Image (cartoon, grey):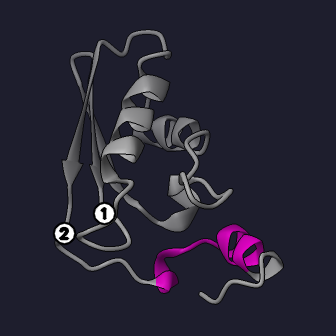
Amino acid sequence: MTPEEIMTVLKDVNDPEYPVSIVDLGLVRGVEIEDGTVKVRCTFTSTGCPCMDWIKNDIKERLLKEPNIESVVVEDDWSKPWTSKDMSEKAIKVFQSLNTSV
């Protein structure tokens, strides 16, 4: 699989609080693949996000369903703080439909 294909698969992983994928929220900062191991770099909406472990587990569970992926490593990436500007248009529309500010 390519990093782009991994990103497509990760669109199946929704944020636990909102019906939006972690990709559309802008939480996935990068994907690397080497010898059957996928490394996913993620940020979160805050350093104290109570859903961090839940999201990391969901990433691992989803990717391990794919053929030829033997292991998954999820790393925190705090190099750039998350903002609502990281969200896709799709995610913004979901938040607007929920009458939630972004």
Snapshot quadrant of residue 54: top left
Dot 1 falls on a residue whose secondary structure is loop
The count of marks equals 2
Residue at which label 1 appears:
43
Instruction: Rate crowding at label 2 as few (under 14), some (14 to 19) or many (20 or more) other CA atoms within 10 Å.
Output: some
Residue at which label 2 appears:
78
- Asked whether residue 93 is drawn in magenta, I would say yes
Amino acid type, mark 1? Thr
Of callouts 2 and 1, which one flags the residue occurring earlier in the amino acid sequence?
Answer: 1
Residue at the extreme bottom: 101
The x and y percentages for residue 90 are 72, 68
Instruction: Rate crowding at label 1 as few (under 14), some (14 to 19) or many (20 or more) other CA atoms within 10 Å.
Output: many
Please report the bounds of the magenta region as a residue range.
84-95
The x and y percentages for residue 7 are 49, 44
Amino acid type, mark 2? Trp
The x and y percentages for residue 84 are 50, 83
In the rendered image, the quadrant that contains the C terminus is: bottom right
- Asked whether residue 89 is drawn in magenta, I would say yes
Residue at the extreme front: 50
Above or below 26: residue 76: above
Q: Nearer the viewer, residue 82 or 47?
A: 47
Q: Residue at x 49, y 27 (%)?
A: 62
* Disc number for residue 57: none
In contact (CB < 8 Å): disc 2 and disc 1? yes
In the rendered image, the quadrant that contains the N terminus is: top left
Above or below 1: residue 36: above
